[in-house]
Each structure stands twice: as structure tokens, then as C-alpha cells.
Image (spheres, rainbow, N blue to C red):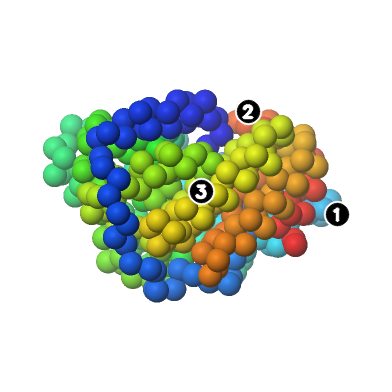
Amino acid sequence: MKKNFLIAFLFAACAMGCSKTTSPGNPVNPPDTTGTQTTNFAKGADVSWLTEMEANNYKFYNRDGKQEDCYQVMKDENMNSIRLRAWVNPVDGWCNTADVVAKAKRAKAAGMRIMIDFHYSDSWADPGKQNKPAAWSSMSFSDLKQAVSDYTTHVMDTLKSNGVTPSWVQVGNETNDGMLWEDGRASTNMGNFAALINAGYDAVKSVSDTIKVIVHISNGFDNSLFRWMFDGLQNNGAKWDIIGMSLYPSSANWSTLNTQCLSNMNDMISRYKKPVMICEVGMPWTDSVTCKSFLTDIIAKTKSLANNNGLGVFYWEPECYNNWQNYSLGAFDNSGKPTMALDAFKN
């Protein structure tokens, strides 16, 4: 997420500098023929804060000022997909399995497709921190892999028993240097990271082989970082269906970063024969005109990828407003209504 952009940049630099730990090799993944390519482009929003905001008496309104359920507001903005983060045992309960299931059921009832974003942590996991859940902290690596498998299976089974089968699942969140540190730190043990990815991948597929599994890292403009990571995972036998990216440009550099991101997306598709998805975007809500231009452009660029290999774009927590959690990259104004930035999803 954007809060850790500077740390993400530093880890990206570290990742490139540590690339000698793996050898690039040649792509071996076959072309994807299992249905990840689709003309049903995902226009999405991560609304993982929603239930906590509602518990704090936040209300949501459409463009006309009519109070509506947040999912309906997103549908009014032409969004068709919802992304939800999953934490193992968060102190305050938000984003635990029960909370994720409750939000996912509401998304399904609203007719939205669903992405589950496993952080494999009790709190935020991103390029600057990938902390193990407290309950897993002293496990051997073998037991850690089993914990990833068991926990993933449990969440997916619980969703399924509640009538929800996600379209996509992220195995890790912004894993620029792996996850579940130190065991799964990619720059020191890419093989361990690949094994953890596979534990999550296999668990997801055991519940439903229709679900597409995403490996997600930030800085979608940084081709060197992506080649280092996915060459390393490929050389260590990791499995994935989709390459996920985050992109958080500034008002000054969005056009340059979008162009670099397009180049990177094309390279990822060519090099690994897998489709791509922009899993997170954001920009300050106060500059909605520029944000609309940025979103319109990155959506168009993602849609332009050959053979429908650009699967979608998700805005990260657009519903945040009125300085919620000190986060200012939402796309609602301080009255709880969408800004014109979200016009980009209506095209």
C-alpha cells in the first residue's frame, strides 16, 4: 500500500542488487489456456476497511448525495469486483476470517466478483514488513509451509461453505522481498519463498481449481524488480496464474510511470506467458482531475494488452474519506461521495 512507498522503493533496489542469488534462465511456463484471459475486465475496489468504518459511523453516498450501501456506491461507479485483505489473528479482529467472510458475502449479494488478498500476517504485510503471525513465529520451515496450507484451506473452505468462491486469490501481499520473514525472504532464500507460494497455491486449488492465483509485488513500473522476482520464482518451481502489480504515482510522474508499467506488463506476458492485473492503485483525493487522467490511462493501457492479457485494475480503499486512518489516497470527498476520479471506471 502507498503508506510504505519509500520503503517499497528501497526494497526494490535491494532486490535488484541481490539478483545474483538467482539466475534468470529461460521462461518455462506454458501459455495460460485455463480461462484467465477474459473480456470481462475487472474494474475493482479494495474496501477492506469497510466494516470498521461502518462501526465508526461512517456513511456512504452516491453522486446525488443519497445514502447507499458502499457496495452499491461502487456499482454505481461501474465497478464489478471487490478485493478483501485477510489477516490471520489481528488484535482488533478486523480483516480476520469472520470479517472477510461477512464482507465477501455482501459483495457476492451485490453481484460483484471477489479477490482475497492473503497477507499471511496478523497485520500489514508490504515491501517494508512481512511479519509472521504470532502463532507461527517459532515454527520450523516445514511447519510454516503446513501452516500456510492449513490456514489458506480453512479460509477458502469457510468462504465456500458460505456460498462464496472468489475469482482470484493473492498468495501474499506486495511480496517484493518474499513473505514470512526471515524464512521466506526472497533475497536470501528464493527457494523458501517459492515453496511458501506453492503451499498457498495448492491450498487454493484444492478448494476450487477455477480460482486464479496471483503473485503480487509493488512498483509496477520497475521491470528489473519484476524480472528478478519472477525469474527467481520460476527457477525455483513456483506456481502462479497471474502477475499482480501495485502502482501509486504522483501527480507529476503518473504519465511516465504508466508508460513504464505498460512496457513491464508486456514484458511479463511475453516472458512468463501469464496475464497481468493491476491489484492496487491510488492518488491523493484532493487532485481528482489528475487522478481521473491517471486512472483512465492505466485502465486503457491494461485493456490494450494483446489477447485480453490485461485482466483488470483495482483502486485501493477508494471509500476512505474525512482522514480515515490518516489515509489520503482514497477517491471520496469529505462528505462521503465519490469524486470525479472514479469517472475513469465508467468508460
Q: Which mark is residue 200?
A: none
Q: Is residue 134 left or right of residue 10?
A: left
> Residue 221, how many percent across, how many down?
54, 41
Which sits earlier in the primary sequence, circle 1 or circle 2? 1
Q: Which residue is mark 3?
A: 264
* Above or below: residue 47 compared with residue 153: above
Q: Which mark is residue 64?
A: 1
Q: Quadrant of the C terminus?
A: bottom right
* Above or below: residue 90 compared with residue 28: above
Residue placed most toward the observer, 232 or 70: 232
Instruction: Give the residue type that dot 1 points to.
Output: Asp
> Residue 187, how many percent across, how many down?
29, 33
Q: What separation in Å lies between label 1 and label 2 (alpha carbons)?
A: 26 Å
Q: Which residue is mark 2?
A: 326
Q: What separation in Å lies between label 2 and label 3 (alpha carbons)?
A: 31 Å
> Residue 209, how many percent across, how many down?
33, 70
Instruction: Give the residue type that dot 3 points to.
Output: Asn
